Amino acid sequence: TAYETILVDRKGRVGLITLNRPKALNALNSQLMNEVVEAATAFDRDPEIGCLVITGSEKAFAAGADIKEMQDNRFPDVYLDDWLGPWDRLGQLHKPVVAAVAGYALGGGCELAMLCDILLAADTARFGQPEIKLGVIPGIGGSQRLTRAIGKAKAMELCLTGRMMGAEEAERAGLVSRIVPAADLLDEAMAVAETVAAMSAPAAVMMKESVNRAFETTLAEGVRFERRLFHAAFATADQKEGMAAFAEKRTPDFRHR
Ligand code: HXC
């Protein structure tokens, strides 16, 4: 497929999506939303892909929803059209997704990063939910995922004031797993994704499902869910291979089945 607002590439078992509207700091217009969701869904279904990476440019991961595109929107239209609904499909992908964030990740950009599973930040990254300055609130889960990630105190302050936080603060608060020098960001994100993609695909998908379940349910139900998947892992050929390889002191040759 020919995309106009993103670049799509693959390296081994990793699928890479690069947001590419440089003149608008990767503002998320409808075309970009549809293209990201389509490309990510295609990678998710591709048996040759084990992990995805989503990144932006040096200056901006994404500076939010496209303000110029949405400014004349009216309630009945956006309600009936389920505007922004397709983004939910990104959070429902089976395979793990790494967000590699440099520069601005604001509004929908911060929300897009939080829809991913592993969040790596360049030292230049700046996160925020500045919607309040435009007279609105987040619409792709920002008020929910930011609060779960960093707690009410910081989330409330950031959302109510629109203040941006830098990479250091974001790491301290638990929003990102690691900070890397901007020049190494993509290489590092690809290396992390290659590591994940080399694991048994069923195990990686179970792992993602299980961790995400922690945000959806009680501890007892979450542990029960994990236990069922754990038992199910013994139905995969990769479990036999992984444990045989350990016993034989060799590297496992996972078939992702
Ligand atoms: C449309 C945008 C944009 C956006 C930047 N641009 N952000 N266009 N929507 N969200 C455009 C600018 O209009 C400008 O175009 C070009 O990109 C470069 O931006 P500048 O402002 O000139 O760059 P700079 O001075 O470096 O400032 C960077 C910035 C600022 C601090 C990130 O652009 C900014 O505040 N952007 C808006 C951030 C924001 O409010 N995001 C939340 C959106 S609401 P021209 O044509 O003038 O060169 C949102 C709702 C979420 O995300 C709900 C669901 C998605």
Image (cartoon, rainbow, N blue to C red):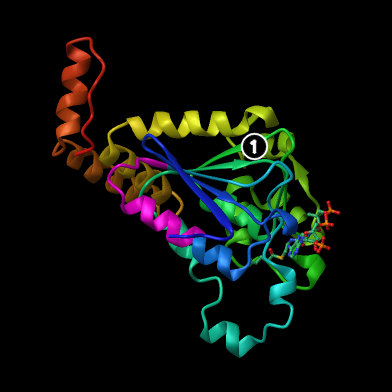
Q: Position of residue 56 (x, y in %)?
A: 63, 47
Up the image or down, 220 lies above or below 253; here it is below
Q: Position of residue 146 (x, y in %)?
A: 62, 53
Residue that numbered label 1 is attached to:
121
In the image, taking residue 130 as reference, residue 197 lies left or right, namely left
Residue 34 or 167: which is nearer the viewer? 34
In the image, taking residue 179 as reference, residue 249 lies left or right, namely left
Residue range of the region highlighted in magenta in the rendering: 36-51
Up the image or down, 208 lies above or below 27; here it is above
Q: Is residue 18 visible?
A: yes
Residue 105 or 163: which is nearer the viewer? 105
Q: How many marks?
A: 1
| Majority SS type along the magenta span | helix
Up the image or down, 178 lies above or below 111; here it is above
Q: Residue at x 31, y 53 (%)?
A: 45
Residue 101 or 243: which is nearer the viewer? 101
Quadrant of the image for the N terminus?
A: bottom left
Q: Quadrant of ligand 1?
A: bottom right
Quadrant of the image for the C terminus?
A: top left
In the image, taking residue 123 as reference, residue 193 lies left or right, namely left
Q: Residue furthest top?
A: 249
Q: Is residue 148 visible?
A: no
The answer to if 40 sits in the magenta stretch is yes
Up the image or down, 99 lies above or below 199; here it is below
